Image (cartoon, rainbow, N blue to C red):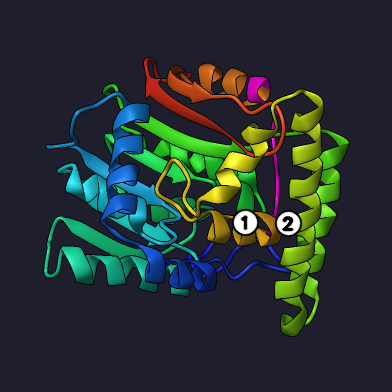
Amino acid sequence: MNADREPATEARFEFGANWARFLSVLNDERIDDAVASLKKFLDVDDLHGQRFLDIGSGSGLFSLAARNLGATVTSFDFDPQSVACTQELKRRYFPDDESWRIEQGSALDRAYLESLGKFDVVYSWGVLHHTGAMWLGIENAIGCVTSDNGKLFVAIYNDQGWKSHIWWFIKLWYNRIPRILKTPYVMIVAAVTQMLVILKYTIKLKPMVAIAPLLRDESERGMSLRHDMVDWIGGFPYEFATFKTLLDYFESRGFSVITANRKTSQGCHELALKRVACAE
């Protein structure tokens, strides 16, 4: 498959446009949070001497975090605007740096990924389930991990059964409606979703579990809650998997878990994995 092609789909979310808006609220605190999350999940103090591949770099925040930790970074994204966002962060923080390479490419283009070589850390958070061919993307990402204790960090949407299929239609319709209706659509869907979540935790006598995140526009990874919500409602194509399905698959491919965050409702399973054996 050519680097400028991905599977045909009826609608595709403009991820890069959303990340361009996110850059306007990016600050040192968010960058520090991103660095801290990488250190925590990969169980490292730094990445000096490590080759880091960011598959679907999006805003470029985690490529920047990896570079701040000392890694030699290669970033790529299918979306030209996401590539531009990553280039903007490099311009701001690491201008003329030969240790950070940024390209446009597809996670589904095996020949392209093979041309990049092998990496000590392959990172793809919330990307592969938006390619239109998630398992191909996962397999291609695995192929980039060096056989010598290489690490893979992925985040994949949780399979919630019928709820996930409802979200598939919600996301599809976001991308089909006229642009003028997209903002009110996000506001309505977000409001209804949050009301249901608050109701759920109020019944459990824990309302602040749902309310507290709404009082700040920041997530644990340094991202923006507001921009993450647009991504969540609009992100399409959209695939998902259970934690067990993902774990079984990665173990069969010779990986063991370093750190994992298993979702029981909406959201992404996060898995930081280490290659312990090469699959037959």
Residues under numbered marks 2 and 1 in contact, where contact means CB atoms less than 8 Å apart: yes
**Magenta residue check for 231:** no
Q: Describe the element under mark 2 as helix, strand or loop.
A: helix
Pointer 1: what residue? 229
Q: Describe the element under mark 1 as helix, strand or loop.
A: helix
Quarter occupied by the N terminus: bottom right
Q: Report the span colored magenta.
A: 236-244
**Percent x, y of residue 10:** 77, 68
Q: Residue at x 56, y 59 (%)?
A: 226
Pointer 2: what residue? 190
Location of residue 83 (image quadrant): bottom left
Q: Residue at x 63, y 62 (%)?
A: 230
Q: Is residue 9 visible in this depiction of the protein?
A: no
Foreground residue among 162 and 280: 162
**Who comes first in sequence, dot 2 or dot 1?**
2
Q: Is residue 36 visible in this depiction of the protein?
A: yes
Residue 199: give its label: none
Whether residue 135 is situated above or below residue 261 in the rendered picture: below
**Percent x, y of residue 246:** 61, 26
Q: Amino acid at mark 2?
A: Ala
Q: Residue at x 11, y 69 (%)?
A: 96
**Percent x, y of residue 129:** 62, 47
Q: Residue at x 77, y 23 (%)?
A: 204
Whether residue 77 is situated above or below residue 142 in the rendered picture: below
**Percent x, y of residue 197:** 75, 39
